[in-house]
Amino acid sequence: MTKIIDIIPPNINKSNTVKIVKKEKIHKKGKAPKILIALASFLVVGFIVAMFVEGKGTVTIYPVTRDVSFEEVVYIEPQESEIDLEKNILPGEYFDEKLSFEDTYEATGYDESATKAEGVITVCGEFSGSALKLVKNTRFLSAEGSLTYKAVSAFTVPSKTTSGPGCVEVDVIADEAGDKYNITSGTFSIPGLQSTDYYTTIWGELKGGQKIEGGSISEQKVITEKDLVLAEDLFKEKYLAAAKGSLISNLEEVGTYVYFDEGFNQTFDKFIVLGSEGDKVNDFKIEATITTKVLIFRKSDVDNFVEKKLLLSEENRSIVPNTLIKEFVKTEDLEDNAVTLKVSAQTYSNISKVLILNDVKGQELEDCKNILKDFPEIKSADVFASLFWKNKLPSNKDNINIEINFDN
């Protein structure tokens, strides 16, 4: 038997590099036409759907408006609970507040307690001849020239002797009150002798412990009649206004009431002045309790009254928003609970949206405008369809929105 051995020689490759060969992608043919077909189908379906969808429509109406006004005397009655159009009565109520106040006022008067300084001075003369007699109230002027004293009684100044000047003690009193006249030393001239030879030869002085004392001025504030009158006037002016302001603030905070300024009534339940004319004090107090009351009525009642009054003469009409003006005028010839109410506004006819929808549904836009022109209560109108390729409003009334606008 012959044995055959198949020997494959080894692949000898000195390089260990492995080569990777990237195969090119093979593009399949025939996908592009399928996408175009799908897109065309979508557009066709969309077009068909759009042709059958009505879309939405909007009709904006600008009504014909009319200015109206009236003026009525209205009576605010606290005992009434309902509006009375025939008698022009609005229900009202009293709103009151009681507040206590106190304030301090300065006393401006003065009670002056004053004394004059008194003492003894020695008066000496250095002249020859007979003694000199001087009268009561002879004035003595201090060397500084600022203090004047007077002799309490007449006195005689002796002439000089061989041993020196002749001297005499004289009681004096200060010309004015005040402690500045209290002195313990000093010299004095006699102004009354200024035109004589005695002026330079007679003088006075404090010597041997002599002094002039006891002068003082004490001032104490005191309440005057003017202080009381002025304080009461200021207190009433200030705190009547404060009490009224507090009540107004409370009403404004609630915000649902109307009042007129002339309707306020204020009384003092207590008014005490803690001081009297002549009292020696630096200041005094006033205490008081004030009750403030005002007749008020509700804003909602006013609005209802005005609307009903307006619409009585404006049958089948409504008030244009933000045109209603109300003014209250209080005059002296009116009763306390009466006020003149002046009202002005714009009104428009109530337009039947159902009637308009029946007339314009499914109509061409231009035809809609012509139809709406025939309504006497409509000044102008805008018609809009949401689908631009459709030039008509939807046939379904539910897809049409009617708006009323007053800005045109």
Image (cartoon, helix red, strand yellow):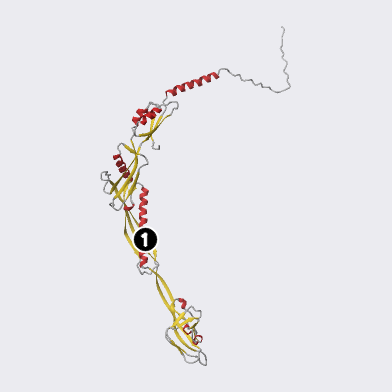
Q: Position of residue 317 (x, y in %)?
A: 32, 37
Crowding around mark 1 (Cα neighbors within 10 Å: few <14, some 14 to 19, many 20+) is some
Which amino acid is tagged 1? Phe
Q: Quadrant of residue 406?
A: top left
**Is residue 60 something that shows in the picture?**
no
Q: In the rendered view, would you say 232 is above or below 261?
A: below
Q: Is residue 112 above or below residue 187?
A: above
In this view of the protein, which residue sits in the foreground, 59 or 177? 59
Q: Position of residue 246 (x, y in %)?
A: 37, 53
Residue projecting furthest to the top: 1
Residue 29, percent from left and from top: 57, 17
> Which is nearer the eye, 290 or 231?
231
Q: Which quarter of the picture shows residue 275?
A: bottom left
The C terminus appears in which quarter of the rendering?
A: top left
Give the structural element (helix, strand or loop) at label 1. helix
Residue drawn where x is 33% and y is 62% of the image: 272
Quarter that holds the N terminus: top right
Vertical placement of residue 23 versus 170, above or below: above
Q: Which residue is mark 1?
A: 235
Q: In the image, is residue 262 above or below residue 325?
A: below
